[in-house]
Amino acid sequence: MLLQLLLRDTANCSRFNEKVIISRSLFIRDLCDRLKQVNENAIREADMRARAVSRNATAVIVSIAALAILLSITASVWFTHGILKPVKETTETVRRISSGYLNQKIDITTDDEIAGRS
């Protein structure tokens, strides 16, 4: 009798395993596969968005750097011209005075160091 109970319980366990556990494990495996696919797609999309943001940021940084370079070149040319123009005028006037034209005047239009030396 005990043997019959054990055999019946084993058969019941085997049917339970086939009907419930295997079907649920297959269902869980399918869910995991779907979740994996969704996750991979999300990672791919996030990567594409991150690359687009990176490209845009690089373009902005390069544009700002180019603008800064152009502004610095423009400012340096402007400052250099502002400094050299009075020096050139003073040098030319001194040359004329040294050539014998003693009635030369230097026009002083600023209050900076160059004007003080003129």
Image (tube, rainbow, N blue to C red):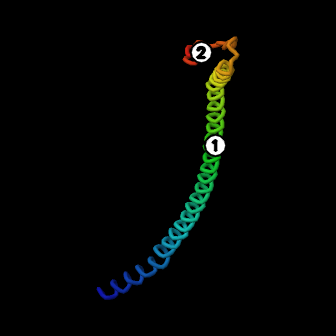
Using residue 10 as the reference point, say whether residue 83 is left or right of it: right
- The circle on residue 2 is none
Q: Residue at x 63, y 45 (%)?
A: 62
Residue type indicated by callout 2: Ser
Label 2 packing within 10 angstroms: few (<14), some (14-19), many (20+): some
Front position in the image: 104 or 1: 104
Residue 95 relative to residue 8: left or right: right
Q: Are marks 1 and 2 in contact (CB under 8 Å)?
A: no
- Residue 42 in picture, x, y percent from top left: 58, 57
Which label's residue is closer to the chain start, 1 or 2? Answer: 1
Image height check: is 102 above or below 47? Answer: above
Give me the residue at 29% from left, 85% from top. Answer: 2
In front: label 1 or label 2? 2
Q: Position of residue 68 (x, y in %)?
A: 62, 37
Q: Residues within 10 Å of mark 1 (few under 14, many from 20)?
A: few
Q: Is residue 50 above or below residue 96?
A: below
What amino acid is found at the position of numbered circle 1 in the picture?
Val
Q: Quadrant of the N terminus?
A: bottom left
Q: Is residue 24 left or right of residue 49?
A: left
**Location of mark 1 (residue):** 60
Question: Circle 1 sits in a helix, a strand or a loop, which is it?
Answer: helix
Q: Split into 4 quadrants, where in the image is the C terminus?
A: top right
State which quadrant residue 33 falls in.
bottom right
- Residue at the limit of the structure toward the front, as seen here: 100
Q: Foreground residue, 97 or 81?
A: 97
Residue at 61%, 34% in the rendered image: 72
- Check the image and name the residue furthest to the left: 2
Q: Give the quarter of the image for residue 103.
A: top right
- Closer to the camera in the image, 100 or 112: 100
Where is residue 94 drawn, in percent x and y?
A: 64, 20
Q: Give the total number of marks visible in the rendering.
A: 2
Q: Which residue is mark 2?
A: 118
